[in-house]
Image (cartoon, rainbow, N blue to C red):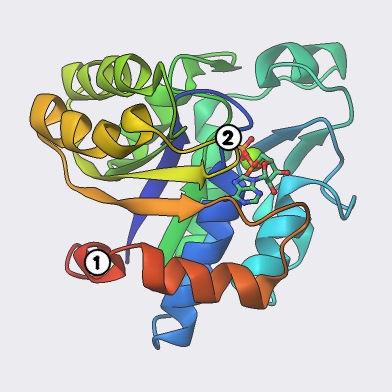
Amino acid sequence: MSGFFITATDTEVGKTIITGGLAGILRQRGWDAGVYKPIQSGHLASNPQGDAARLQHLSGVSDPVTEICSYSVDEPLAPLLALRRAGKNVCLHDLISQYEVLKRKHDVLLVEGAGGLAVPYVEDGLVVDLAVQLSLPLIIVVRPNLGTVNHTLLTIEYARARGLRIAGVISSGLGKTPIGIVEETNPTLITQYGDVPFLGSLPWLGPHPSREKLLHTMETALQIEILEKQI
Ligand SMILES: Nc1ncnc2c1ncn2[C@@H]1O[C@H](COP(=O)(O)OP(=O)(O)O)[C@@H](O)[C@H]1O
Ligand SMILES: [Mg+2]
């Protein structure tokens, strides 16, 4: 079993859409890929608008949402705060236990973090600590526009300082705002200064893109085979 840990430069960048879409594509290509969202805040796992349900739909896995995400809280706060306010005392080993359950069911597991790497996550760690414990290479999802080089390089340096390997960087939402010199040059700058593979830019697909449209666009926009070589 192998897998990837999907993080981002911030929240609302595109982790869920990319994680679900990648799992869906890998499954279409014959891999038994699963998805795991260790902690979800903002929606209960059963809510169709939450990440667990979106990951289930986009990936096409048949695992119940409560297995995809076993710790969910309604309140839209950072995970640690939301869990504490809901009276839940969660530690890294709780998340690793559920990871082991899903790992036994799949050949490749795509794990979606929350926010970015330095988000307070559980009683004994930040998001980065789970990635370290799981020893998974990172996929970093980034915005395509101004400011993203700084955020991406900071994330890369922070990850490397903790011994994490970076499988690749993907940008999401290209074209939501006008594409100019910044959007055109960011991928090269990220590759040059970050020394990481840039796997491609997912175009902006408009509100509520269908699974079919997402998977089709990702197939053409992203270099999936670079990830497949790392499985
Ligand atoms: N390329 C894209 N095209 C269309 N919508 C997108 C795209 N990337 C992200 N979104 C939308 O932006 C919002 C945030 O994306 P999401 O994947 O939930 O981010 P995160 O998991 O990082 O918080 C969602 O509504 C998602 O559908
Ligand atoms: Mg998400």
Identify which amino acid the numbered label 1 is placed on. Answer: Ile
Check residue 69 in the rendering and tell me which mark sits there, or answer none.
Answer: none
* Label 1 C-beta lies within 8 Å of the nearest ligand 1 atom: no
Q: Is residue 89 left or right of residue 17?
A: right
Identify which amino acid the numbered label 2 is placed on. Answer: Thr
**Which structural element holds mark 1?**
loop
Q: Is residue 66 left or right of residue 105?
A: right
User: Considering the image in quadrants, where does the N terminus appear?
Assistant: bottom left
Compared with 2, 44 (above or below) is: above
Residue 9, image x, y percentages: 45, 24
Residue 66, image x, y percentages: 77, 55
User: Considering the image in quadrants, where does the C terminus appear?
Assistant: bottom left
Q: Label 2: how many residues lie within 10 Å, few (<14), some (14-19) or many (20+)?
A: few
Q: Are marks 1 and 2 in contact (CB under 8 Å)?
A: no
- Dividing the picture into quadrants, the one containing residue 162 is top left
In this view of the protein, can residue 105 be seen by the observer? no
Viewer-side residue, 142 vs 183: 183
**Which structural element holds mark 2?**
loop
Residue 172, image x, y percentages: 49, 45
Q: Nearer the viewer, mark 1 or mark 2?
A: 2
Between the residue at mark 1 and the residue at mark 2, the CA separation in whole angstroms equals 34 Å
Q: Residue at point 77% right, 52% down?
A: 207
Residue 80, image x, y percentages: 67, 15
Check residue 231 in the rendering and tell me which mark sits there, or answer none.
Answer: 1
Q: Label 1: how many residues lie within 10 Å, few (<14), some (14-19) or many (20+)?
A: some
Query: On the rendering, which quadrant does ligand 1 occupy?
Result: top right
Q: Residue at point 32% right, 21% down?
A: 155
Residue picked out by circle 2: 177
Q: Residue at point 46% right, 32% down?
A: 8
Compared with 67, 43 (above or below) is: above
Compared with 162, 4 (above or below) is: below
Q: Is residue 168 left or right of residue 101?
A: left
